[in-house]
Amino acid sequence: MDLEYGPQYDDFRAEVINFVKENENTKLTGPARSESRVAWQQKLIDHGYFARSIPKEYGGYGGDMDIIKLRIIAEEFAKSPIPKPAGGQGIQMLVPTLLSLGTEEQKQKYIKPTLRGEILWCQGYSEPNSGSDLASLQTKAELDGDEWVINGQKIWTSTAHLSQMCFILVRTEPDAPKHQGISYLLMPMDAEGIDRRPIKQMTGDSDFNELFLTDVRIPAENIVGKRGEGWKVANATLGHERGSLADPNVTQNRLNSLIDLMKSETIDGQRVIDKPIFRDRLLSIQGRLMAQQSNALRILSSQINEDQDANLAKSIVKLQGTELRHELEGLAIDAMGELGTLYEDSPNLRDEGAWQMTYMYFLGLIIGGGTNQIQKNIISERALGMPKEPKIQGA
């Protein structure tokens, strides 16, 4: 079977390889939104290696949706230490939502600075009593003249302490059925009445936050879609989120690092990669990753085939991808032996504790974006047509 892309793509691959070699030693300094990071994002856009199919009028490259070229870009970037394009909730979740459901004014105002990394976004979905049952949310917004007034609480709000904007779900029709009374708003994070409280994680970091919202006022036009129809918009965003978690191209880069680690670490004088038990685990991960990369091509092709439903494929990315990354990082920890138990402040720490931190981080992602248990129910019931999970009467 010939799995080559064909000679018509050889010149394009050579072009990408040349760019990667010329820029693989690029170092980005400073926090998110720093000058060097914004400049790098723009350079990638200018060459068509990021935001390739997004129209130029919204800050993208304006190219065609050639899935083979997108695949070649992903392959060559994964092989190199070159800085990868920035991601995050704004780029991976909000931008595609606005492209399909936003107003022209919203597209013009938000997409370009988001792609460049000048605006960071957080997601105001989960609440203390509304996680997997998201439609039961209670944060409310009332229209007062030309402003929405928001009151309520959100939790597990990733990067809220760094973000300038938040796409948030609120209840605007309190008497409507729970799925029909929700609206999708765009909330500036510097608005008066927002209290951000970081949540310390087991990694020692505080990527998640609680948000307390008291009489927060935002412009009435900051609504995506129609009033009371935010559930449809939210599901579009969730589809993009689940499709972006544990990107197989990023996992491929991580697998390459794992292979290097297993070649350098030894047990009783023998390389870890030469130990049958470890090698079998590695090959299992590699095989499942290849399957995920094929699934990623299915998702890419759905962007140019309007009749192709990729919701199942995106759910599989979230379900399988997060569990695979967690397993991959765990294999690295096992390969380091007793040194794998170290995390902070040790002269023998490997890779500054990155393997241990990512192992814990992906344990959280198995829960985030819709728990994997819920994902299994969605796939079995909605995609495979299996009977719904039985409910206990009176529970």
Image (cartoon, helix red, strand yellow):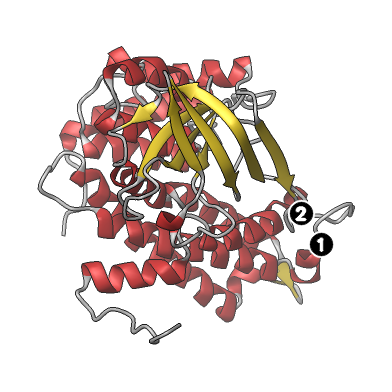
**How many residues crowd mark 2 within 10 Å: few (<14), some (14–19), many (20+)?**
some
- Which residue type does callout 2 highlight? Arg
292 versus 226 height, above or below: below
**Which residue was labeled with disc 2?**
350
Q: Secondary structure at mark 2?
A: loop
Q: Amino acid at mark 1?
A: Leu
User: What's the residue at 27%, 18% (across, down)?
Assistant: 104
Point out the image quarter for the N terminus.
bottom left
- Residue 95's label in the rendered image is none
Residue 50 visible: no
Look at the picture and state if 158 lies above or below 292. above
**How far across and down, in percent of the image, does residue 119 sit?**
53, 23
**Residue, x 42% and y 28% (percent of image)?**
143
Dots 1, 2 in contact, CB < 8 A:
yes
- The answer to whether 378 is drawn above or below residue 4 in the figure is below
Q: Is residue 160 or residue 333 the one in the foreground?
A: 160
Query: Can you identify the residue that label 1 sits on?
Result: 342
CA gap between label 1 and label 2 equals 8 Å
Quick one: quadrant of the C terminus?
Answer: bottom left
Residue lying at 54% horizontally and 24% vertically, measured from the top left: 217
Front-most of residues 36 and 116: 116
User: Total of numbered circles in the picture?
Assistant: 2
Closer to the N terminus: mark 1 or mark 2?
1
Work out whether residue 112 or residue 190 is closer to the camera in this orientation and state it.
190
Q: Position of residue 192 (x, y in %)?
A: 64, 24
Residue 108 position (above or below residue 218): above
Residue 139, image x and y in percent? 51, 45
Q: Is residue 349 left or right of residue 270?
A: right
Question: What's the residue at 40%, 52% (across, down)?
Answer: 242
Which image quarter: residue 106? Answer: top left
